[in-house]
Image (tube, grey):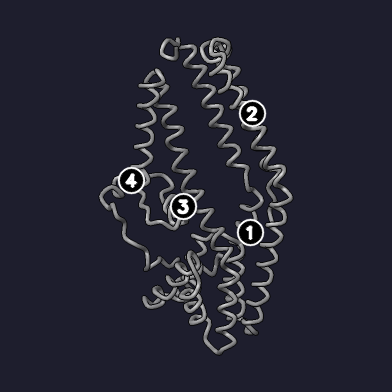
Amino acid sequence: MLGLMDPATEIALLIGAMSGITMLLLVAAFAGGSTRRFTRRLQEVTIHKTLDRRGNVPTRSLSRRGSATPGIDRIFRLLPRREALVERLAKSGRVISVGQYMLVMLGAVLVLSALLMIFGGFSLLASLLFGMAVGVFIPHYIIGRMGRRRVQRFIALFPEAIDLMVRALRAGLPVTEAIINAGQEIGDPVGTEFRGIEAGMRLGRDLDSLLWDIAKRITAPEFRFFIIALSVQRETGGNLAETLNNLSDVLRRRRAMRAKARAMASEARASTMILGSLPILVTVILSITSPVYIAPLFSDIRGLMLVGVAVGMLLTGVAVMVKMARFEI
């Protein structure tokens, strides 16, 4: 049936797909706006800490791992916003090079395009467009989700790591030794990042630059507060153990408040999943029980236009409900 579509039908199908992709991009652009503004203001206040005091030049990381695919990486060295992609891959906590990521993306595009042409009966242009849209989105989403989950695991263990530092400081150890000991005792990903501080200091790096390198991978305000507290204490003096103890207490309260807010929004999240899945379930059931009845919706140009409008409205409603059920704490 799909193989007999005329050019007008294919154009309508492409318009619907592009409208859905545009809606997803708009949702991604406006999601978490307050968090980005807060992070940007915090970076403006503390950006001078990332610069070398001697020459006012950013310090490059000496502990950067070599790429597993240097030849393929050279092919994509002119990729736009390549540094942003490198930082995004580093946030996942896995050793993933730009070449490996691009190979997976290209493979996903080709496989999805071939499946659409063989089993869906789409034309070459339509298959490539659908394959590019889905093949680019899936790796991007997976890497972003890996980074977010790693940050969540880091924040969950961070108060315990601060408690270990407080005990070490009260025992008379310097702050660098306290951080290294905490990295050896605590689990991942906090332990992995703090153990990297020990390796960096052996290479001659200073503590501030190493901590700000971690902040590039752990984009959480809690960790930036920790770095600022250390920097202020080293410049002005004071009881660092008491400061870190108060910070640990604040982080625990934030975690408890975040869990309470998530529990209060559970009903809204369940409603979003139910209302968002109902149209898909009804479509699948009608396709099984009454295929002749629902066939014009996917074979006629007017039906395809209605499908595109319905998908756009559904995505908009789901995005609004998700935004309402999400609290920034």
* Residue type of the residue flagged with mark 4: Phe
**Distance between mark 2 and mark 1 Cα atoms:** 41 Å
Q: Is residue 315 above or below residue 12?
A: below
Q: Which residue is mark 3?
A: 88
**Distance between mark 3 and mark 4 Cα atoms:** 16 Å
SS for tag 4?
loop
Where does the image place residue 48, in percent across and percent down from the top left? 55, 68
Q: Which mark is residue 41?
A: 1
Dot 3 or dot 2: first in sequence order is 3
Dot 4 or dot 1: first in sequence order is 1
Where does the image place residue 236, in percent across and percent down from the top left? 63, 82
Can residue 57 be seen in the rendering of this structure? Answer: no
Where does the image place residue 128, in percent across and percent down from the top left? 39, 26
Res 5 → quadrant: top left
**Residue shown at the point (40%, 24%) measured from the top left:** 116
SS for tag 3?
helix
Q: Which residue is mark 2?
A: 278
**Marks 2, 1: nearer the viewer:** 2
Residue sitting nearer the eye, 36 or 151: 151
Q: Quadrant of the C terminus?
A: bottom right
